[in-house]
Image (tube, rainbow, N blue to C red):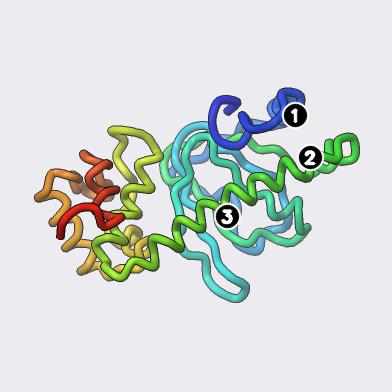
Amino acid sequence: MSERGWLPLLPEAFRAEVLRRSVLQHFAPGQPVFHLGDPPGGIYGLVAGTVSVSLAPSGASPRLILLGVPGHWTGEACFLTRKPRRGELRAVTETTLMHLPLDAIDQMAPRDPQVVHHVALILMMSVEFLFRVIHDLQKPEADRRVASVLQRTTWIGEETPIPLTQSELGVMANASRKQVNAALKRFSKAGWVTNAYRSIMIADPGALRRFAEGDEAD
């Protein structure tokens, strides 16, 4: 956790205290970590496995936005706003998370004014990612939106099956099941992906990226 994601960007003393105060928690596939509307809680860092992050504006149901990768942290809004959870975090595969409780952060903050800035950095990293999501969703062609989602999920790791169904991929790409199926057939024929039951293997992430950005011929 000290080598990727949020923690490596921060001072050594702060990293050490986060690691000392955090607790490892294990989740089975499909098990929720927290739900929309849950009381305020601490932050979670992904050590191993895969989690899904679903978000929603006020009054709406959460929709799948991204799959977390090791080193990814979330849950910072509760510390910053003291409001209930604004989304849902759920284990997709066997998952290990590092949990820094809210009261632990509250104990750290009075002794170090920079703690608020350190936690806010998680928020800004999330905002940067959401900029990418918005950019991808504005592409008019459904197959390029699908390619964009697949290319983003390769951050999980090379040669690792992407644990997404066609329906879930459609939600993330704002595409119909028919559009997703057509795109996957096209990408499979080109040798870019291998489509299996409830998972997709990325064979050529570079080709997907070029196609998603319009650098690959139609």
Residue type pointed to by label 1: Phe
Q: Is residue 107 visible?
A: no
Give the mark nearest the N terminus, 3 or 2.
Answer: 2
Q: Residue farthest to the bottom?
A: 59
- Label 3 crowding class (10 Å Cα cut-off): few <14, some 14-19, many 20+? few
Give the mark nearest the N terminus, 3 or 1.
Answer: 1
In whole angstroms, how far apart are the C-alphas of marks 3 and 1?
A: 23 Å
- Asked if the residue at tag 1 contacts the one at tag 3, i.e. Cβ–Cβ closer than 8 Å, the answer is no
Q: Which residue is mark 1?
A: 14
- Residue 140 or residue 104, whichever sits in front: 140
Q: Secondary structure at mark 3?
A: helix
Q: Is residue 207 visible?
A: yes
- Horizontal relation, residue 184 to residue 12: left or right: left
Q: Residue at x 27, y 67 (%)?
A: 142
Q: Position of residue 17 (x, y in %)?
A: 75, 27
- Residue 18 or residue 126, whichever sits in front: 126
Q: Position of residue 95 (x, y in %)?
A: 48, 37
Checking the image for residue 127, the label placed there is: 3
- Horizontal relation, residue 74 to residue 133: left or right: right
Residue type pointed to by label 2: Val
Q: Secondary structure at mark 2?
A: helix
